[in-house]
Amino acid sequence: MLTLKDLADFQAIDRQLAAARQVGDPPGDDLVSCLVKNNFSLGLAALHRWAEESASPIPEELQPKHFFWSLYKKLPDWADAELIKTGQNFFHRHVEEIMLLLGFLSLPYCYAAANGAKVLCRSRRIMTDTRRRLAETARFVLSVHQANAFDCSGAILPQPLRQIVAVRLMHAVVRYHLSRSSKWNVQAWGLPVNQEDMAGTNLAFSFITLQGLRKIGLPVEWKEAHGFLHLWNLVGYFLGIFPQWLPTDMRAAACLEKTIAQRQFRSSPEGRALAKALIDSISSHPQRWSFMQVPGFVPSLMRFLLGEHISNLLNLPPATLPFSIFRLYRLGKRFNSNGKMTAKNFQLLLQRLYGKLSYPIPEQIT
């Protein structure tokens, strides 16, 4: 795994990240290639069904003897059960703040990576059905923090791991289609959903989230941050990120985040379009909470969390509310009279608003 010492030589790590842009997820890519050679439609249909079930074996259409599935037989040697539990407990204590930061910080942060934003735009659903795509991402985040999320001990994978598999194979399918498209420049932009982009996205959901919590005035203890980062390292590992791009601690995460941002963050039409679609979706949501109805609240909070540099890259509207109100910001008991919103209540809210949520994998991308 990645340590601060590994990041000491900036030029060396820059070269390694440049090489990582041409690398996808060999096990996932090989399985998708095998599915394409057989009946691709049947394979995708079987994957969608299996990902939503909780007590079924891997279907034959997904080639359960393929070496890809051996990666889900056990946890990696570096996995620490105590740290995983610490990360899960931390998430459940601050679930409403973390879920708020998902839309206001983690996702728009990813849009600042110009080459990665090109992939998101070409998958189209994030642009044409932003609200539902955001709900699917929220469901994924809630799922991976369940108590049994990484239980590899039995013959049947728990549903959180099934959802991780579905997202991993969705990435592989996107890579398969786009890398073969005449409209995708692999040399200039890198392989779609490559190791560098996946590492940066993982940081957006872990390290950047922790930074966001501190920015809104919520204190985060070192042990809690370490546990949360460790849990997301495990998510990243099962999503196909190489261990060398999973930082062991917050200092290594900060250095890796800074390096990737320097390499990839710049203004792009795709990033600006994604940010606008996200703001429009949050602002127009019929179920949005009362404080979001204040004119200018959504872009102002987003600009506060992202900082001026990234906000300007994304062409966010100017802030119309003073940042001082966000530094004192607490959600407190705004969700219901009984106190904090729980992860279970979030799941029920998503189900009520959107019905069944899944991770639809396209058979074709142009």
Image (tube, rainbow, N blue to C red):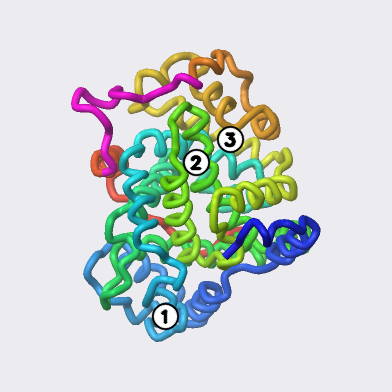
Q: Which mark is residue 70?
A: 1
Task: Quadrant for residue 243, please give it.
Answer: bottom right
| Residue to which mark 3 is pinned | 275
Work out whether residue 42 can be spotted. no
Q: Are marks 1 and 2 in contact (CB under 8 Å)?
A: no
Indicate yes or no whether the magenta region holds residue 338: yes
Q: Residues within 10 Å of mark 1 (few under 14, many from 20)?
A: few
Q: Residue at x 49, y 41 (%)?
A: 209
Residue 145 at x, y = what percent? 34, 52
Q: Are marks 3 and 1 in contact (CB under 8 Å)?
A: no
Q: Nearer the viewer, residue 252 or 74?
A: 252
Magenta region, residue range: 327-343
Q: Vertically, is 251 above or below 108?
A: below
Query: Which quadrant is home to the N terminus?
Result: bottom right
Q: Are marks 3 and 2 in contact (CB under 8 Å)?
A: no
Q: Amino acid at mark 3?
A: Ala
| Residue to which mark 2 is pinned | 209
Q: Vertically, is 350 above or below 153?
A: above
Q: Nearer the viewer, residue 26 or 125?
A: 26
Q: Residues within 10 Å of mark 3 (few under 14, many from 20)?
A: many
Q: Secondary structure at mark 1?
A: helix
Q: Earlier in the sequence, mark 3 or mark 1?
A: 1
Q: CA distance from mark 3 to mark 2?
A: 18 Å
Q: Residue furthest right?
A: 11
Q: Nearer the viewer, residue 109 or 215?
A: 215
